[in-house]
């Protein structure tokens, strides 16, 4: 019998970071690719439909994913060149981004091993011409699989919020679970009430809608009427690269553990209990907390997660120790913020983690040509 699997469809690319000394560092990236990576590290069978080339950068992406257990779907390496996002860091700490993107992924061949879940989001879900393939894949698996979606908005590509909303809502209507960051929700809705927006999304068809709030944890609502707020976990933040992607992977993994993936469990998903929902969201938060504690999109393995969970259980059993740990983490974080502010005003090159930390660092332009955008670093959650 074939092993249960998750199918992810979306971009895999290379972030090219150019420092003040003109040295470059190339890092595999892409939101959907990070979700697949996170699931594979948790021991799940994850397959990725992407669009990379057979060039050196494509080989970098392939080795990174396959060495962590992600299988690339046949035909995913048919691009003329692997997509890139080039970040050039200036003396003032600002980064100018140039993008060279191509998105025309293959349609996965039919398989008797139907995926329990299909995930998409970010660039691949909205960029022409590949978004039509994404929509076709979601439609094909809607009758057999749980569909999950993270808008992970890219304003430079999406135009205005008014332009983006119909496209995003179409994908939400095709999904069972939707996760969105508070920053993305702010942009999409021009500051509308978060909970009201999530509930309006549920009216389109999903069973669960979640908004992540960085240090304030997450809010989840369900089609059955549940409302659940789950606090964040104490963490010393190295950077927030991949935080949202690891959270999304954690939701999929948590629902898998609860036995709620697959179209045959769609009714049960719509009627998820408060206890099960809390376990799923807390699980996703724990995974994201580990990810932000170290540089880059570096989600934990199952073994790491279990060790840290046992340690957290011991801490929870001793409130005084927990308070002491939280105070220490806050002190270190405050010191790091001061150090970071000093570094921005100096002439020293920034670290790769700092250069890649902004949530919207890979906000792509249209595929017809390269584009540029200048932003300052932020501390937003993914």
Image (cartoon, grey):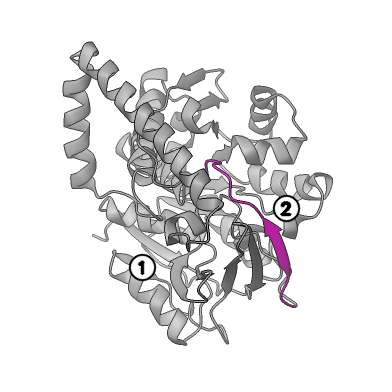
On screen, 275 above or below 270? above
Element type where label 2 sits in the image: helix
Badge number at residue 65: 1
User: Measured from the top left, where is residue 306 in percent x and y?
Assistant: 19, 38
Side (left or right) of 68 relative to 82: left
Identify which residue, 87 or 188, lies in the foreground: 87
Quadrant (top left/top right/bottom left/bottom right) for the N terminus: bottom left
User: Measured from the top left, where is residue 206 in percent x and y?
Assistant: 59, 36
Name the residue at 55% across, 21% down.
Answer: 224
Identify which residue, 372 or 298, lies in the foreground: 372
Side (left or right) of 8 relative to 331: right
Name the residue at 28% across, 55% down.
Answer: 41
Q: Is residue 147 visible?
A: no
User: Measured from the top left, where is residue 178 in percent x and y?
Assistant: 56, 40
Residue beneath disc 2: 155
Name the residue at 58% across, 38% down.
Answer: 181
Q: Which of the two marks, 1 or 2, is nearer to us in this view?
A: 2
User: Measured from the top left, where is residue 316 in percent x and y?
Assistant: 23, 18
Tell me the magenta residue range.
369-382
Side (left or right) of 190 relative to 262: right
State the CA–CA distance, disc 1 to disc 2. Answer: 27 Å
Furthest residue in direction front, as rendered: 346
Q: Residues within 10 Å of mark 2 (few under 14, many from 20)?
A: some
């Amino acid at each position: 019998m074939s092993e249960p699997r998750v199918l992810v469809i979306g971009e895999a690319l290379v972030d090219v970071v150019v420092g003040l000394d003109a040295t470059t560092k190339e890092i595999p990236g892409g939101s959907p690719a990070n979700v697949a990576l996170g699931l594979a590290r948790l021991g799940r069978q994850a397959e990725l439909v992407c669009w990379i080339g057979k060039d050196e950068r494509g080989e970098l992406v392939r080795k990174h994913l396959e060495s962590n257990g992600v299988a690339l779907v046949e035909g995913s390496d048919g691009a003329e060149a692997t997509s890139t996002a080039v970040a050039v860091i200036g003396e003032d700490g600002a980064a100018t981004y140039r993008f060279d993107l191509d998105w025309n992924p293959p349609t996965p061949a039919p398989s008797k091993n139907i995926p329990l879940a299909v995930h998409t989001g970010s660039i691949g879900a909205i960029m022409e011409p590949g978004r039509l393939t994404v929509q076709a894949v979601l439609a094909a698996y809607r009758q057999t699989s749980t569909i999950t979606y993270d808008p992970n908005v890219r304003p430079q590509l999406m135009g205005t919020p008014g332009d983006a909303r119909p496209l995003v809502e179409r994908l939400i209507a095709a999904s069972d679970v939707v996760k969105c960051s508070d920053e993305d929700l702010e942009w999409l809705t021009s500051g509308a009430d978060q909970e009201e927006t999530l509930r309006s999304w549920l009216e389109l068809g999903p069973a669960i809608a979640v908004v992540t709030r960085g240090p304030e944890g997450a809010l989840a609502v369900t089609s059955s009427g549940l409302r659940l707020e789950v606090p964040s976990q104490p963490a010393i933040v190295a950077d927030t690269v991949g935080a949202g992607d690891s959270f999304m992977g954690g939701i999929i993994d948590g629902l898998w553990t609860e036995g709620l993936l697959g179209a045959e469990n769609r009714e049960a998903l719509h009627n998820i209990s408060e206890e099960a929902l809390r376990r799923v969201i807390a699980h996703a938060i724990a995974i994201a907390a580990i990810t932000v504690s170290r540089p880059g999109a570096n989600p934990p393995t199952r073994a790491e997660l279990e060790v840290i969970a046992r340690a957290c259980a011991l801490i929870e059993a001793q409130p005084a120790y927990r308070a002491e740990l939280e105070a220490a983490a806050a002190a270190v974080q405050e010191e790091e913020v001061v150090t970071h502010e000093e570094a921005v005003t100096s002439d020293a090159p920034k670290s790769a983690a700092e250069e890649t930390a902004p949530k919207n660092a890979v906000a792509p332009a249209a595929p017809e040509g390269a584009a540029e955008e200048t932003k300052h670093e932020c501390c937003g959650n993914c």
